Image: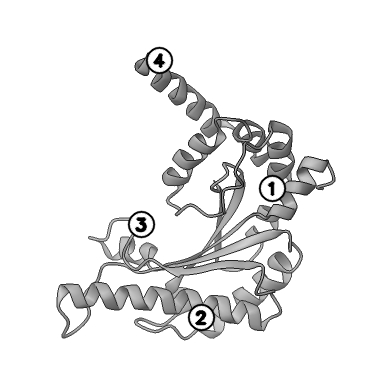
């Protein structure tokens, strides 16, 4: 029986991965089994789960509407300079948008002061994405590579990387808010240091990918209610 359940889950996951649009993903994930499948896909995508669980299954029709809406959000984010954009799922198994900014573009080495290039990209992101999609909640996450700090022990380096990741996430959050993004829209800001690497830290290219700030746009409670009412467009 357990074997059969595992095979069924695997088949469902394969179907989800093969879907080409966020609308299809939303329709499939928005079922009773969506939370479990969404968590798996989230881990594959390399993200830390975002979004507060709403305490109940989201219907397929609701998920489809949210997926279609997030297709539009994703397209807007893809037009932002220096932004890497992909579809992921939130804690409710609903379609979400992950926007990654390379820390090499955002900050100088060891610094949490935003560069001029970063400010240009974040200004475009705030004006053309966040402020026109206020029904999207936002989570900001900072990360570093595992490089050690000069004159520091291994443990001290881990702690310094953790602190730097938090400072960088907060720098992005504060700048977005200075541009007029509502503080209530930004639901969480956190640093994860060396955790959750997306590439091999043993190479320079891998380290560069791991030094990043990720911004997630996911369905707010208001968006979910609008989708359930059939008024989300």
Instruction: Give the labeled residue for mark 3.
Output: 196
Instruction: Give the labeled residue for mark 4.
Output: 4
Q: Nearer the viewer, mark 4 or mark 1?
A: 4
Instruction: Give the labeled residue for mark 2.
Output: 171
Of callouts 1 and 2, the N-terminal one = 1
- The residue drawn where x is 73% and y is 68% is 128
Helix, strand or loop under label 1: helix
- The residue drawn where x is 69% and y is 32% is 60
Labels 4 and 1 touching (C-beta < 8 A): no
Instruction: Give the labeled residue for mark 1.
Output: 71
The residues tagged by marks 4 and 2 sit, at their Cα atoms, a distance apart of: 48 Å
Of callouts 1 and 3, the N-terminal one = 1
Of callouts 2 and 3, the N-terminal one = 2
In the picture, the disc for residue 33 is: none
- Residue 191: x %, y % from top left: 41, 69
Answer left or right for 229 relative to 87. right
Front residue (pair 209, 221): 221
Helix, strand or loop under label 3: loop
Helix, strand or loop under label 2: helix
Helix, strand or loop under label 4: helix
Of callouts 3 and 4, the N-terminal one = 4
Labels 4 and 2 touching (C-beta < 8 A): no
């Amino acid at each position: 029986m357990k074997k059969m359940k595992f095979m069924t889950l695997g088949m469902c996951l394969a179907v989800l991965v093969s879907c080409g649009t966020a609308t299809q993903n939303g329709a499939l994930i928005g079922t009773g089994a969506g939370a479990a499948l969404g968590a798996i896909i989230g881990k594959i995508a390399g993200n830390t789960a975002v979004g507060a669980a709403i305490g109940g299954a989201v219907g397929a029709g609701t998920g489809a509407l949210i997926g279609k809406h997030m297709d539009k959000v994703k397209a807007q984010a893809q037009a932002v300079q220096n932004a890497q954009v992909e579809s992921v799922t939130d804690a409710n198994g609903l379609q979400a948008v992950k926007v990654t900014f390379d820390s090499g573009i955002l900050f100088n080495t060891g610094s949490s002061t935003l560069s001029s290039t970063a400010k240009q990209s974040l200004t475009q992101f705030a004006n053309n994405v966040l402020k026109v999609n206020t029904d999207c909640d936002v989570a900001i996450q900072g990360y570093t590579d595992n490089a050690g700090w000069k004159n520091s022990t291994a443990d001290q380096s881990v702690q310094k990387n953790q602190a730097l990741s938090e400072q960088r996430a907060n720098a992005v959050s504060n700048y977005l808010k200075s541009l007029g993004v509502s503080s209530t829209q930004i639901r969480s800001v956190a640093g994860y240091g060396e955790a959750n690497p997306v590439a091999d830290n043993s190479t320079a290219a891998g380290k560069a990918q791991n030094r990043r700030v990720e911004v997630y746009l996911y369905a707010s409670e208001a968006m979910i209610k609008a989708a359930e009412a059939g008024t989300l467009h």
